[in-house]
Amino acid sequence: MTKERVYNFSAGPSMLPEPVLKKAAEQMLNYENSGMSVMEMSHRSSSYLDIFNNTKALLKKVMNVPDNYEIVFLHGGATQQFSMIPLNFLKTGKADYAVTGNFSNLAYKEATKFGDIHVAYDGKEDNYAHIPTQDELNLSEDADYLHICANNTIFGTEYKYDPVTKNGCPVIADMSSNILSQKVDVSKYGMIYAGAQKNMGIAGLGIAIVRKDLLNDVPANAPVLMDYSLMIKKDSMYNTPSAYAIYMCGLVLEWVDQNGGVEAMYERSIKKSQMLYDYLDSSDFYKAAADKANRSRMNVTFTTPSKELDAKFVKESIEAGMTNLKGHRLVGGIRASIYNAMPVEGVEKLLDFMKKFEEENK
Ligand SMILES: *Cc1c(COP(=O)(O)O)cnc(C)c1O
C-alpha cells in the first residue's frame, strides 16, 4: 500500500497537476453552489455551458489559436481521429504520412482504408530513433495533406521544426504527447489534434484545432460523430459531450495559464529533460535511445547495459516511490515520461536513483 502520492512517470494516462486534483476534489460534491457535481449536470445547463465556454476560450488563449480556426471536443481520444482525418480531409484521395513511431504508423494504417496513402518517411530501419529533416521528407506533388506525429511517445523523439509541404497542402499534426508544452504557431498547421490524457487532462477526450476552410466538402456519408464540420456546427454537442473530461481539461488549462503559460511549460520541460539527458550522456552505464538532435522533452527513453538490469531498475524504482518507468512493450528499456505536471523534484529524485543504481550495478 502506498500512503503518499508517488512520482508517476507513466506515458499516459499520466500525472495531473496536484492543484487541479485538489480543485476537482473540492468541487466534486457541489460545483460552485449549483448543488451538484459537474458529473451530474445537464450539458445544456448554464452552469455547464460556462465551464465548456471557459475551457474553449482558455485553450484559444493558451495556444494563441487564430480566429480562422475552430476548436472541437470529440470522443474517442486521439485514435478516433486517425479514422476521421482521412474521412474528412482526403479530397483527391492521396495523402502523405511520415511514419516516425507507433502512433503515426497506426494513423497511417488506418488511412490506407480510405485512400492512396504514401509513406513520406519510414523510421523503422533505425527503430524510430530519428525524426526526418525537411529534406528527408519524401513529399508528393499531389497530396491532400501531410500527417505527422509531433512527439513520439513510445520512442522518445520529437520534431524541433514545423514541416512544410511541397504543394501547399495542409500539415496535420498529432500533438497528443507534447501539446501545451511549447509555443506552437498554429497557422502553420491545417489541423492539430490530441488525446487529452498526456498533457491536458483525462482519457477519452480528444481535441482538434481545425482551420475552417478545410472542411468545405466532407463526404455526405461521414458518420455524425466523425464529421468535423458537423461537430463544429453543433459546438461539440451533437450528442452528450465528454462533459467531465472537458471540465478537467479546463482545470488543466487554467493551471497552465496561471503558471506562466506554454512559454513557462517549455522552459521547465527543457530544464527537466536536460537534467536527464546530460546525465545519460555523461554515463557509460546508461544509453539514451533517441538521436541527440531529436530527443523528446516529454518522454526520455534509455537502457541500462542489459535487459536484466532494466528489469531490476524498474523493480527498485517502484520501491523508491517512482512508478511506470518501464519502457513500452514494443521497445523495452526505461522510459521516463515527464509531462507538464511532473515536478522538477520528481526528476531530481529519479536522477538520484539513477546515480545510485549505476554505482551499485556497474
Ligand atoms: C497516446 C497517444 C495516442 C493515442 O491516444 P488515445 O487517446 O489512446 O487514442 C495517439 N498519438 C499519440 C502521439 C499518443 O501519445
Image (spheres, rainbow, N blue to C red):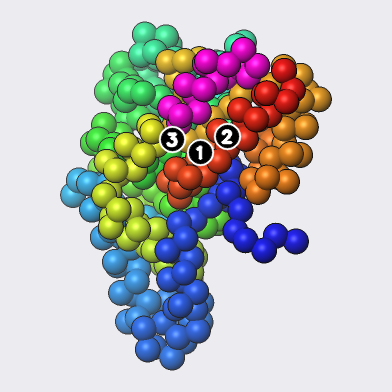
* Residue that mark 1 sits on: 348
Is residue 274 one of those drawn in magenta? yes
> Which x, y percent locates residue 273?
45, 31
Q: Nearer the viewer's eye, disc 3 or disc 1?
A: 1
Residue 352's label in the rendered image is 2
State the residue at coordinates (38%, 33%): 271
Residue 257 visible in the snapshot: yes
Residue type indicated by callout 2 = Asp
Residue 230 visible in the snapshot: no
**In whole angstroms, how far apart are the C-alphas of marks 2 and 3?**
13 Å
Callout 2–callout 1 Cβ contact below 8 Å:
yes
* Residue that mark 3 sits on: 272
Whichever of callouts 3 and 1 sits on the residue coming sooner in the sequence is 3
> Which x, y percent locates residue 150?
43, 31
State the residue at coordinates (62%, 12%): 284
What's the magenta region? Answer: 272-290
Residue type indicated by callout 1 = Glu
Classify mark 3: helix, strand or loop.
helix
